[in-house]
Image (tube, rainbow, N blue to C red):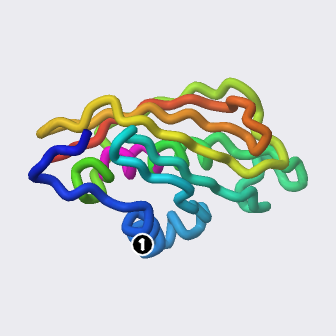
């Protein structure tokens, strides 16, 4: 649940914040869902040739997947505290190659405290196969 003295962000507000960042625009992130009640944010990123591990492979580069995880986790915690946040730490486990698909990242807030927030992120292909998991820690100060 959101804290009564903090205005949570809507999906439209999160999308506006994403759209002012050249890097996030490059990632092509689209907010699919932002739900303060479940503390979940879902975003989609389309495949682009610039994201390929090797030209023509249609396989996502792991660095791009990591960037998606970091960004979606950040905005999930940010949704709960009402603003974007700096990353303190994050980790990624790659489970399966992402090939010729958009990415769908679902982030769940684990903590949105006074000084730190934590979010878990699952990354799926368009068919629903789990490709990677990550956890981000963000400063809420």
Which quadrant of the view contains residue 11?
Answer: bottom left
**Viewed as shown, does residue 75 lie left or right of 140?**
right
Magenta-highlighted stretch: main secondary structure? helix
Residue at 38%, 52% (x, y): give it.
75
Q: What is the span of residues highlighted in magenta in the rendered image?
A: 72-78
**Viewed as shown, does residue 118 lie left or right of 96?**
left
Residue 136 seen in this snapshot = no
Figure check: 101 above or below 16: above
Percent x, y for residue 68? Answer: 54, 48
Nearest the viewer among 138 and 9 is: 9
Q: Residue furthest bottom?
A: 20
**Viewed as shown, does residue 56 lie left or right of 126?**
right
Residue at 42%, 75% (x, y): give it.
20
Residue indicated by mark 1: 16
Which quadrant of the view contains residue 137?
Answer: top left
Which quadrant of the view contains residue 70?
Answer: top left
Residue at 32%, 33% (x, y): give it.
118
Percent x, y for residue 78? Answer: 30, 51
Percent x, y for residue 115? Answer: 14, 38
Q: How many marks?
A: 1
Percent x, y for residue 52? Answer: 77, 52
Figure check: 65 above or below 14: above
Secondary structure at badge 1 equals helix
Residue at 67%, 37% (x, y): give it.
124
**CA neighbours of label 1 inside 10 A, class few (<14), some (14 to 19), many (20+):** few
Q: Is residue 44 magenta?
A: no
């Amino acid at each position: 649940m959101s804290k009564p003295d903090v205005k949570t962000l809507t999906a439209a507000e999160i999308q506006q914040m994403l759209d002012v960042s050249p890097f996030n625009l490059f990632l092509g992130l689209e907010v699919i869902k932002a739900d303060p009640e479940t503390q979940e944010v879902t975003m989609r990123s389309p495949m682009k040739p610039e994201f390929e591990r090797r030209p023509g492979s249609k396989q996502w580069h792991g660095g791009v997947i990591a960037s998606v995880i970091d960004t979606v986790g950040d905005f999930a915690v940010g949704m709960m505290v009402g603003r974007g946040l700096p990353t303190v730490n994050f980790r990624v486990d790659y489970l399966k190659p992402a090939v010729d698909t958009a990415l769908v990242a679902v982030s769940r807030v684990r903590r949105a405290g006074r000084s730190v927030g934590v979010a878990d992120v699952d990354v799926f292909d368009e068919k629903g196969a789990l490709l990677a998991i990550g956890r981000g820690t963000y400063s809420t100060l």
